Image: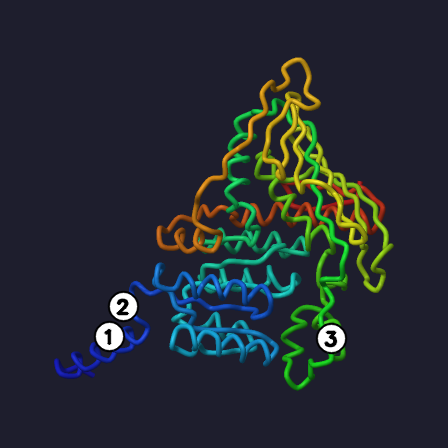
């Protein structure tokens, strides 16, 4: 059927009016969907709202399996932007929206990679919380999907956007420490910050089947819903929940991201009402020859800098941000050097800039996410089994050795 000139003008005017309701032309506005409206999701929502005008974006859709979170996030967006986003409990429905150009994934750990894969297959750019994956097959699948569909992906390891970390990376990568010997990483705590109230969670307000995703069917459990951090099928434990931040920094600084092998051990000592260990020690070996030690405990928060790098010329840590000759040999560093933090856009803004610039090299891309996933999966398995784990980069497999 032929469109008349009057009909064409009317249709164009309607499209323009719809675009103006969002404040920008449809070709310029970036439509964002948020999957997961809990603690992390709300933090990201704040970033998106703050960056809305500068980056011409609009949060157009929200997804959460819990009605309480979903309703609160929708009200917040409507208050801040004047437009109510669409809401869903099923993330596939959000991804099917043509007005969604990119998504932020802030769900429990076990859902990260399946949702990232689905987003890539839907050709939506993605910001995905850490750890990227808790299962090897999901880690492999996420890299393949992101690369196949060429989406812009940013992992939620935001230390990569910290000014001190950025300056330190350049210093170490320039060889200031000489040959790298060891990277010590640690992340400790002494209080039950993972404890959340769950009495208020009602079965009728939760899409429990969607929440479980690929997990075995099981009766609704409000404790598992809110305290998923404590369960083995929901996360790999301390090394994934906490350790990926300093481990990712070590991968970045050494430019040696994929471990060869891992050994480890652990125990439940202070906070035992969990399936996971609350004290953990892992050692990973890397192709360039250095080893990485990860140490974490929940009964004592003392532990020094999260990252300490030991080389033949001295030592550098991410607390004093100072390069010293401590421990170095004949060529050890003489005068200590403290790095000055770099100034750069934040982690979320870096992702948005890369989308605008069609630059797929975000600060924490899918390959960085893959590397921290491999390290955390191997470390967790080594601690749980007491056996050495070996990663084969050619076959992308992990085996006991």
Graded by Cα atoms within 10 Å as few (under 14), some (14 to 19) or many (20 or more), the crowding at tag 3 reads: few
Q: Nearer the viewer, residue 2 or 271?
A: 271
Q: Is residue 107 left or right of residue 97?
A: right
- Residue at 69% x, 16% y is 329
Q: Is residue 314 left or right of residue 238?
A: left
Q: Nearer the viewer, residue 199 or 24?
A: 199
Q: CA distance from mark 1 to mark 3?
A: 47 Å
* Label 2 element class: loop
Counting residues from the N terminus, which is met first, the one under dot 2 or under dot 3? Answer: 2
* Label 1 element class: helix
**C-beta proximity under 8 Å, tags 2 and 3:** no
Q: Which residue is mark 3?
A: 217
- Residue at 65% x, 28% y is 315
- Residue at 45% x, 74% y is 77
Q: How is the image coloured?
A: rainbow
* Label 3 element class: loop
Counting residues from the N terminus, which is met first, the one under dot 1 or under dot 3? Answer: 1
Graded by Cα atoms within 10 Å as few (under 14), some (14 to 19) or many (20 or more), the crowding at tag 1 reads: some
Numbered circle sitting on residue 25: 2
Q: How many marks?
A: 3
Q: Which residue is mark 1?
A: 16
């Amino acid at each position: 059927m032929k469109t008349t000139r009057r009909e064409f003008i009317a249709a164009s005017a309607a499209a323009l009016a719809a675009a103006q309701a969002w404040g920008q032309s449809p070709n310029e506005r970036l439509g964002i969907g948020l999957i997961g409206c809990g603690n992390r999701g709300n933090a990201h929502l704040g970033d998106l709202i703050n960056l809305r005008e500068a980056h011409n974006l609009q949060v157009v859709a929200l997804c959460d399996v819990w009605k309480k979170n979903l309703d609160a996030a929708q009200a917040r967006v409507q208050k801040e932007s004047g437009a109510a986003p669409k809401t869903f409990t099923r993330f596939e429905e959000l991804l099917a929206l043509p007005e969604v150009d990119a998504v932020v994934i802030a769900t429990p750990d076990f859902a990260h990679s399946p949702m990232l894969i689905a987003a890539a297959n839907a050709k939506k750019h993605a910001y995905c919380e850490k750890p990227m994956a808790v299962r090897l097959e999901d880690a492999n699948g996420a890299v393949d999907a992101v690369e196949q569909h060429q989406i812009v992906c940013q992992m939620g390891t935001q230390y990569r956007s910290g000014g001190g970390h950025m300056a330190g990376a350049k210093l170490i990568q320039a060889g200031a420490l000489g040959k790298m010997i060891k990277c010590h990483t640690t992340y400790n705590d002494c209080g039950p910050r993972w404890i959340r109230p769950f009495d208020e969670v009602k079965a009728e307000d939760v899409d429990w089947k969607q929440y479980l995703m690929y997990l075995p069917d099981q009766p609704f459990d409000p404790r598992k819903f809110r305290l998923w951090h404590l369960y083995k099928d929901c996360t790999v434990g301390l090394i994934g929940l906490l350790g990926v931040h300093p481990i990712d920094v070590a991968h970045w600084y050494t430019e040696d991201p994929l471990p060869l092998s891992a050994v480890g051990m652990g125990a439940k000592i202070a906070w035992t009402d969990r399936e996971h260990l609350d004290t953990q020690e892992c050692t990973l070996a890397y192709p360039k020859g250095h080893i990485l030690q990860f140490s974490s405990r929940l009964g004592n928060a003392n532990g020094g800098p999260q990252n300490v790098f030991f080389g033949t010329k001295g030592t550098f840590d991410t607390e004093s941000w100072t390069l010293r000759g401590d421990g170095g040999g004949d060529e050890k560093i003489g005068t200590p050097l403290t790095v000055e933090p770099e100034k750069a856009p934040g982690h979320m803004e870096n992702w948005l800039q890369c989308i605008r610039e069609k630059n797929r090299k975000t600060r924490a891309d899918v390959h960085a996410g893959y590397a921290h996933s491999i390290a955390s999966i191997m470390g967790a398995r080594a601690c749980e089994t007491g056996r050495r784990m070996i990663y084969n980069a050619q076959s992308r497999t992990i085996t006991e050795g």
